[in-house]
């Protein structure tokens, strides 16, 4: 599943293959595949349901569309504290946030080390 989240339209409609759900408190949680930390727990409203699927209205928090959160996430749909379904979601934000704002440092002293390679050909 792919969700496009723009700051001008933070409300997204997503259909799940879960039929005939009851009205109640639903939550949509996304977890980063990179850090395995729960990033967002979003309150979700059941918009409609039938014998084939259920349509949910997910309202992302203000600032989410302008954040640099493009990527693939694990998602879980909860009814209260009970997980109903989970899977993978690709989230695309627009404009995608700032570029080069977080520099990556692996923490090793030799990160920028450049090695010299010497080759001695074996002539016959």
Image: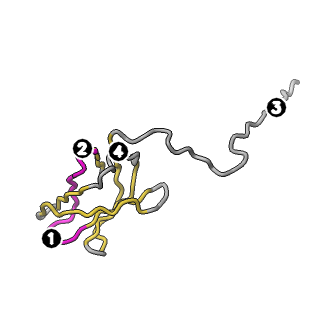
* Residue 13 in the image, given as x and y percentages of width and height: 20, 53
User: Which mark lies nearer to you, 3 or 1?
Assistant: 1
Which residue lies under the disc numbered 2? Answer: 8
Q: Which residues are magenta?
A: 7-26
**Nearer to us in this view, 99 or 117:** 99
8 over 43 or under it: above or below: above
What is the C-alpha distance between the residues marked 4 and 2?
9 Å
Q: Earlier in the sequence, mark 4 or mark 2?
A: 2
Tell me what residue is drawn at x 68 percent, y 44 percent: 111
Q: Are marks 4 and 2 in contact (CB under 8 Å)?
A: no
Residue plotted at (22% across, 55% down)? 14
Decide: marks 4, 1 in contact (CB < 8 A)?
no
Q: Which mark is residue 76?
A: none
Quarter of the image that includes the C terminus: top right
Of circles 1 and 2, which is in front?
Answer: 2
Q: How many marks?
A: 4
Give the residue displayed 46% in from the left and 38% down from the top: 99
| Label 3 sits on residue | 118
Between residue 63 and residue 69, name the one nearer to us.
63
Q: Is residue 2 left or right of residue 22?
A: right
Q: Which residue is mark 4?
A: 66
Q: Are marks 4 and 3 in contact (CB under 8 Å)?
A: no
Q: Residues within 10 Å of mark 4 (few under 14, many from 20)?
A: some
User: Alpha-carbon distance for marks 4 and 3?
Assistant: 49 Å
Left or right of 46 on screen, residue 78: right
Q: CA distance from mark 3 to mark 1?
A: 70 Å
Residue located 84% across and 27% down the image = 121
Q: Secondary structure at mark 3?
A: loop
Q: Earlier in the sequence, mark 3 or mark 1?
A: 1
| Principal secondary structure, stretch drawn in magenta | loop
């Amino acid at each position: 599943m792919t969700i496009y989240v723009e700051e001008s339209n933070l409300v997204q409609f997503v259909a799940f293959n879960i039929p005939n759900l009851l009205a109640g408190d639903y939550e949509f949680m996304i977890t980063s595949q990179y850090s395995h930390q729960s990033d967002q727990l979003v309150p979700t409203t059941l918009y409609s349901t039938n014998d084939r699927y259920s349509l949910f209205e997910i309202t992302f928090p203000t600032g989410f569309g302008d954040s640099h959160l493009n990527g693939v996430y694990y998602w879980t749909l909860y009814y209260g504290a009970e997980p109903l379904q989970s899977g993978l979601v690709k989230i695309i934000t627009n404009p995608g946030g700032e570029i080069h704002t977080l520099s990556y440092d692996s923490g090793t002293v030799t990160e920028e080390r450049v090695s010299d390679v010497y080759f001695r050909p074996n002539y016959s």
